Amino acid sequence: MAWWRSPGVALVAGAVSWTAAEYGLHRFAMHELRGRGLASREHLSHHADVTYFSPTSKKLASAVGTTVVAFPLAASLAGRRWATAFTAGMIGTYFAYEVAHRRTHTHPPRNRYGRWARRSHLHHHFGAPMRNFGVTSPVWDKMLGTYDDPGVVTVPARMAPVWMLDELGRVRPELAGDYVVKGSRSSDGGQRPADRTDAFANAAPEA
Ligand SMILES: [Zn+2]
Ligand SMILES: [Zn+2]
């Protein structure tokens, strides 16, 4: 049996394929389309309001839809066993991405990787929406020239994740080297009409 025929290789190939899909879908199907099509509209709505995440039902439907098309193709090319392991690797990594992405917005970092993931993704949101498309890894951004070192990320106060701030709305001391918060959190939740226009034009929100 050729070495690449083993299920372990198929599993890893599936996982790597997801990271490429994560980059490609995020860049081309979501940002480049500027709101044309459901995926782009849903994603740019998340940029306009960072507390908005597409409902799980829509995500499940698209994961099932993709599998139904891709699985028979992979099975005809490499056999059922290989295709099953490949699909498991891809779907497993996709779910890990969903959890990781949501956590960057809802939970503070717990380690170096979590710290990088938050700075990089929040730079994508608030600094440069056409950079740092990879959420779980910088590999494809680095390969394709869209990676920025996040540096100190400037965050509009109305969009700052709760984990970033203390009771007085200041950046927590342990995160002060990573983030600067600008503007004020207004009492109505702070969405501005321009946030939607900016998000759909791939422009960073005004601080
Ligand atoms: Zn996000
Ligand atoms: Zn995005």
Image (spheres, helix red, strand yellow):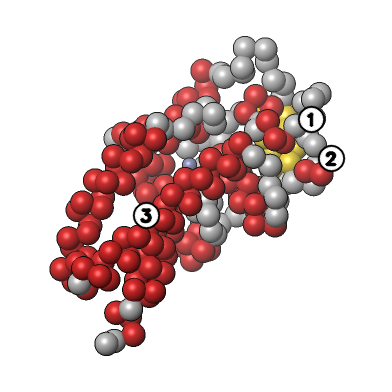
Tag 1 residue: 166
Dot 2 or dot 1, earlier in sequence: 1
Q: Position of residue 32 (x, y in %)?
A: 38, 43
**Which mark lies nearer to you, 3 or 1?**
3
Q: Looking at the rendering, which quadrant does residue 55 occupy?
A: top left
Q: Position of residue 121 (x, y in %)?
A: 58, 46
**Which mark lies nearer to you, 3 or 2?**
3
**81 vs 143, nearest the viewer:** 81
**Mark 3 vs mark 1, CA separation in Å:** 37 Å
Tag 2's secondary structure?
A: helix
Amino acid beneath label 2? Pro
Q: Are marks 2 and 1 in contact (CB under 8 Å)?
A: yes
Say which residue appears at 51% left-offset and 18% top-offset: 193
Image disc number at residue 173: 2
Tag 3 residue: 91
Dot 3 or dot 1, earlier in sequence: 3
**Mark 3 vs mark 2, CA separation in Å:** 38 Å
Q: As displayed, is residue 105 above or below residue 75?
A: above
Amino acid beneath label 3? Ile
Q: Is residue 187 left or right of residue 41?
A: right
Dot 3 or dot 2, earlier in sequence: 3
Image quarter (top left, top right, bottom left or bottom right) of the N terminus: bottom left
